[in-house]
Amino acid sequence: MSYSTFERENTFKSTVTFTSGSTYIDPVSNLAYIDVIKPDGTYLIQGESGQRVSEGIYQYYFSTSSTDPLGLYIIDWYGTFSYDTPWGNMPKHQREVVRIVKVKQE
């Protein structure tokens, strides 16, 4: 598994790209949400709206504190997308894993 590593007590940017084939697409009402789940299963962020950068691309800045656990965090981006007939609107998720460490070693 490949993941990015960040130092605890810093601010990070998470970016998601939603596509259909090779075409960028926005969720219904241009609303993409983000959850960040800590290694212990609790939420660092839950149900926050991401900032739309351009068609199909959203970002969100988040920070960890000195009391947040070290380890692997799950970032879950999601929104509702129109799949037309017969499916209508349905949710779509995109996830990534990041590692939070005390000191990043280069």
Image: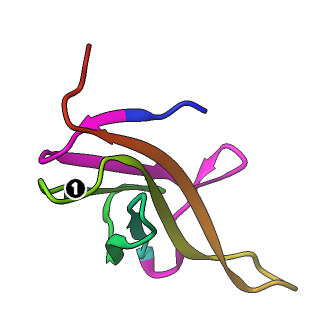
The part of the chain drawn in magenta is 5-29
Describe the colour scheme in one phrase: rainbow
Name the spot of residue 99 as percent of width and height, x first: 38, 40
SS for dot 1:
strand
Which image quadrant: the N terminus? top right
The residue depicted at 74 percent of the width and 75 percent of the height is: 83
Q: Which image quarter: residue 32?
A: bottom left
The residue depicted at 16 percent of the width and 59 percent of the height is: 67
The residue depicted at 60 percent of the width and 65 percent of the height is: 93
Q: Is residue 47 left or right of residue 103?
A: right
Q: Which image quarter: residue 58?
A: bottom left
Residue matched to label 1: 61
Look at the picture and state if 92 lies above or below 98: below
Q: Say few, some or many: other residues with alpha carbon within 10 Å of mark 1 (under 14 / 14 to 19 / 20 or more).
A: few
Q: Nearer the viewer, residue 94 or 5?
A: 5
The residue depicted at 42 percent of the width and 64 percent of the height is: 40
Residue 15: within the magenta? yes
Residue 37: within the magenta? no
Name the spot of residue 17 as percent of width and height, x first: 50, 50
The image shows a total of numbered marks equal to 1
Look at the picture and state if 13 lies above or below 86: above
